[in-house]
């Protein structure tokens, strides 16, 4: 098995393990200090930074206590809402002109993210051009082109293997 594939498989296992453990934790339906400790541990093991994990716990605790939440499904919705609030779309502000380089190991969602960013910035009234920098991986630029078309933005690309 290739090195990169090993990393991808490793991350997949981590993600599945965390989702499973989150479900198990909420299923218990006991939202005491131990619950919040375990949740913080899970967030940290999912690569959430310590400061952010503390903010998430604090906000969740506050909301859940205020609304006296005891139902696991409802509690999970509350966590989802806290995460969405923190990730808020309008936090992504850029100066223009700007150049954004997207890098990452195979299959982590680079091309999809370029499509999402192109769409977001277009909606903000910005003029977007995407450039296919990966001319090595077969069909990489074609995949990017699909997203550029969906977001209705210009694309700069050259032959496969070109400089
Ligand atoms: N669930 C989920 N899947 C995603 C997300 N972003 C991308 N994907 C999926 O992940 C797979 C890989 O996405 P790509 O955008 O092609 O990833 P990439 O990093 O460009 O891949 P390579 O160019 O092959 O290295 C696709 O099946 C996407 O639909 C996301 O935010 N959530
Ligand atoms: Mg790609």
Image: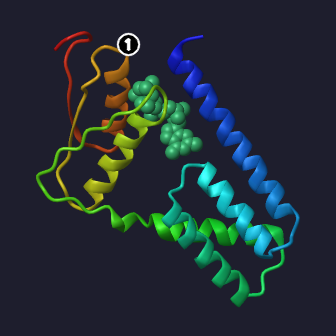
Question: What is the crowding at mark 1: few (fewer than 14 residues within 10 Å), some, or many (at least 20)?
Answer: few
Is 93 located above or below residue 98 in the figure? below
Q: Residue at x 22, y 12 (%)?
A: 159
Q: Residue at x 46, y 63 (%)?
A: 87
Residue placed furthest toward the left: 97
Q: Position of residue 115 (x, y in %)?
A: 36, 42
The answer to whether residue 7 is left or right of residue 157 is: right
**Residue 6: which quarter of the image?**
top right
Residue placed furthest toward the right: 28
Q: Position of residue 71 (x, y in %)?
A: 83, 74
Q: Nearer the viewer, residue 77 or 139?
A: 77
The answer to whether residue 137 is left or right of residue 46 is: left
Is 140 located above or below residue 56 in the figure? above
Q: Position of residue 73 (x, y in %)?
A: 79, 67
Q: Nearer the viewer, residue 30 or 130?
A: 30
Q: Residue at x 69, y 90 (%)?
A: 66
In the picture, the quarter occupied by the N terminus is top right
Q: Which residue is disc 1 drawn over?
A: 138
Could you say whether the residue bearing mark 1 is in a helix, strand or loop?
loop
Which color scheme does this rendered protein use? Answer: rainbow
Callout count: 1
The answer to whether residue 94 is left or right of residue 91 is: left
Q: Residue at x 77, y 51 (%)?
A: 21
The quarter of the rendering in which ligand 2 is drawn is: top left
In the picture, the quarter occupied by the C terminus is top left
Q: Position of residue 7 (x, y in %)?
A: 56, 26
- Mark 1 residue CB less than 8 A from any atom of ligand 1: no
Q: Nearer the viewer, residue 143 or 19?
A: 19
């Amino acid at each position: 098995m290739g090195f990169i594939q090993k990393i991808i498989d490793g991350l997949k296992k981590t993600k599945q393990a965390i989702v499973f453990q989150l479900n198990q934790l909420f299923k218990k339906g006991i939202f005491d200090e131990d619950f919040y400790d375990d949740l913080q541990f899970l967030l940290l093991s999912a690569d959430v930074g310590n400061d952010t994990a503390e903010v998430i716990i604090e906000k969740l605790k506050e909301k859940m206590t205020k609304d006296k939440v005891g139902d696991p499904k409802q509690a999970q919705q509350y966590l989802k809402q806290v995460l969405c609030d923190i990730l808020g779309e309008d936090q992504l502000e850029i100066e223009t002109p700007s150049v954004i380089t997207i890098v990452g190991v195979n299959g982590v969602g680079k091309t999809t993210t370029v499509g999402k960013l192109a769409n977001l910035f277009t909606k903000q009234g910005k003029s977007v051009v995407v450039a296919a920098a990966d001319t090595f991986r077969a069909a990489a630029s074609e995949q990017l082109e699909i997203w550029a078309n969906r977001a209705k933005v210009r694309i700069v690309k050259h032959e496969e293997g070109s400089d």
